[in-house]
Image (cartoon, helix red, strand yellow):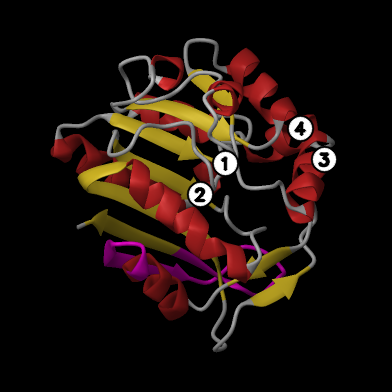
Amino acid sequence: MVPESVRGDGRGIRHGAGERLRTAGVSFPPVTEHQDETRAAYDGVVELYASMFADRLETQPFSRNMIGIFAELVRGTGNLRAADVGCGPGHLTAMLHDLGLDAFGLDLSPAMVDHARQAHPALQFDEARMEALPVEDSALGGVLAHYSMIHTPPGELPALLAEQARVLAPGGLLLASFFATDGPEPVRFDHKVTPAYSWPADRFTELLTRAGLVTFARLLHDPASERGFLDAHLLARLR
């Protein structure tokens, strides 16, 4: 039974869960250095980032249509509750809402969360770490992780995927988008905000499988940037 102090709002999310879980004697994993750096980096570019990406999907048909397919499949599960994990300024949370989902956004950056709340006051946004999501077990019909795991060092990625699997109901959907490489190993590169990693799609798929997710669709396409990495979108379903 979930203690009263950490119960959700009836929709699967625990408000202020960090402090409540500590009060209940449940400890979070220690914050790693890269998370501190990522948080600070995105806190410092909120307005610029929002101005660059708020309407970006208008020129990215592959991403836009994969998110549409994801939303349609989540609606088909009958569980409309969906998390936009690493939501940034909240534009994709709003898109999921417009596509018929009961969507909320989570982000490591408090400045991004503040911006998202101001830009989309009717929607819910909370600060959260991806390896400790403030969401009940098996609560969600879908999780969107749109390029939000690219800054995660390879050794820490399995924990993030396991956490996303934890919050999905059986049959729930995950759409993970990331930079892909043709090589056999993840590649670290200098992202404009903070260092990031590209992944071989097959390796990423293996990690999804280990987390209990079955990948049933993938889309790889040429990049629209100078980096030269492929853009990858993997759709997976919890067993």
**Quick check: is 216 in the magenta stretch?**
yes
Mark pair 3, 4: CA separation: 10 Å
Residue toward you, 114 or 166: 166
Mark number displayed over residue 146 = 2
Q: What stretch is highlighted in magenta?
A: 210-232
Q: In this view, does 138 lie to the left or right of 160?
A: left
In the image, residue 231 above or below residue 193:
below
Label 3 amino acid? Ala
Q: Name the residue under label 1.
A: 86
N-terminal of the pair, mark 3 or mark 2, is 3
N-terminal of the pair, mark 3 or mark 4, is 3
Spot occupied by residue 89 in the image (x, y as percentages of width and height) = 63, 30
N-terminal of the pair, mark 4 or mark 2, is 4
Which quarter of the figure has residue 142? top left
Mark pair 3, 1: CA separation: 14 Å
In the image, residue 162 above or below residue 221:
above
Mark number displayed over residue 46 = 4
* Secondary element at image label 3: helix
N-terminal of the pair, mark 3 or mark 1, is 3
Q: Mark 3 points at which residue?
A: 40
Mark pair 1, 2: CA separation: 7 Å
Residue with the most extreme front position: 25
* Secondary element at image label 1: loop
If the image is split into quadrants, where does the C terminus sit? bottom left
Dot in front, 4 or 1: 1
N-terminal of the pair, mark 1 or mark 2, is 1
Label 4 amino acid? Val
